[in-house]
Every structure is written in structure tokens, then in C-alpha cells.
Image (cartoon, rainbow, N blue to C red):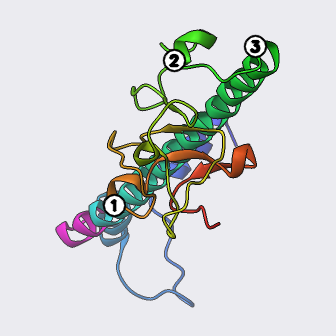
Amino acid sequence: MQPNDRIERYHTCPEPRRERLPGPGCEAWRRFHLHRGLTIVELVLIVAIVGVLASLAITTYQGYRDRLKIDQAVSDIAVISASITEFNADFMRLPNDLAEVGLNTMLDPWGHPYQYVNHATASKGEFRKDKNIVPINSDFDLYSSGKDGASVAPLTAKASRDDIIRANDGTFIGLASVYDP
């Protein structure tokens, strides 16, 4: 057997085995195996499956990106809180604003400035409050306005549910919707 014989044998139709395969000849075999395509129903089914998988992937990826932004905001608030606590230890008072600790230009992952409320200088109406309308901190409030960029003092308000907050004097940093005193 020569190398060319092997290629030629591959491209020719098989010899029919009369004892096992009675039926169509070489032309029918070629038509079925060499020129078979996809029907419109099969194409529509493939496109539908790819569409469903793509939508699931996009939704999952968006949720992953949102969690990353929340984690970044939590980390930033922890760093800012530590800076404010260090300022308090050095000067025996809380800063009036974030500019005194050099962090007034810091933006949250959604592009909004972090919010700071010194309880010693602000009115009680500005304090962040839990579901019982009790302030969530005794020293200062520090938070991000979250994805929507809107926020109000009570954490139960719709505009505040996506805020990233510092609560219980720094023992809790996370989503306002998760916080439960």
C-alpha cells in the first residue's frame, strides 16, 4: 500500500457489505455524509442557546463588578476611618472635614466623594440613623452614597439602601441594607 493509496481510500465511498448493510449505494452515502448542512430550526436553536448563555454570563459579570466596587468602598472607608482616628489621637479632636486629614479629594468607586459628619460640630438631623431612628455612631459618620449617588440620614430610606456605611463606631463597615443593629 502506497501513501497515496491511503488518501484515495479515505475519499472513496466504502464498499457495501451485502451481508450486513443492504441499501443505498455510493451516491446516497456521499450525499448524506459529505453535503449535510444545518436546517433553519437548528440554527435558531443554536442562536437561542448562545443568547441565553451570553445573558447569564453578562448578568453574573455585572454582579461580580458590583461586589468589587462595594469591597473597594468598604476598604476605602476603613482607611479613611483609621486616618480620622489617628488625627483624633494626635490632636485630641475629630477633624471638621476630610480636608484636614488630606482625603477630601478621594472618590468612591462610583465617582462620588465620601461623606463625613463630625457629631461634635454637626446638627443631630445630619447623623445617620438606623431603623429605630437612633444614630449609628457616637463619634462621626463616614459613608459612600453608593451606586445611585443619593443618600438621606435614615438607613431605611430607599435612597440609602445602597450606601456603604461605617456603623457602631467602626465595628461595622458595609452595605446599609445589610446593617442591623
Residue occupying the point 60% across, 54% down: 136
Q: Earlier in the sequence, mark 1 or mark 2?
A: 2
Crowdedness near tag 3: few (<14), some (14–19) or many (≥20) residues, C-alpha within 10 Å: few
158 sits to left or right of 114: left
| In the depicted structure, whether residue 58 falls above or below residue 179 | above
Q: CA distance from mark 1 to mark 2?
A: 25 Å
Question: Which dot marks residue 158?
Answer: 1
**Residue type at tag 3:** Phe
Q: Which residues are magenta?
A: 36-45
Instruction: Please tell me in which quadrant of the rendered image residue 4 appears.
Output: top right
| In the depicted structure, whether residue 5 falls above or below residue 14 | above
**Residue type at tag 2:** Met
Question: Which dot marks residue 118?
Answer: none
State which quarter of the image contains the C terminus: bottom right
Crowdedness near tag 2: few (<14), some (14–19) or many (≥20) residues, C-alpha within 10 Å: some
Front of the two marks 1 and 3: 3
Q: CA distance from mark 1 to mark 3?
A: 37 Å
Viewer-side residue, 13 vs 139: 139
63 sits to left or right of 19: left
Q: Earlier in the sequence, mark 2 or mark 3?
A: 3
Q: How far across and down, in percent of the image, does residue 159 sit?
A: 33, 53
Residue occupied by mark 2: 106
Residue occupied by mark 3: 91
**Residue type at tag 1:** Lys
Front of the two marks 2 and 3: 3
Callout 1: helix, strand or loop? helix
Callout 2: helix, strand or loop? loop
Residue occupying the point 32% across, 63% down: 46
Callout 3: helix, strand or loop? helix
Q: How far across and down, in percent of the image, does residue 41 sit?
A: 21, 72
Q: Earlier in the sequence, mark 1 or mark 3?
A: 3
Residue, far right: 89
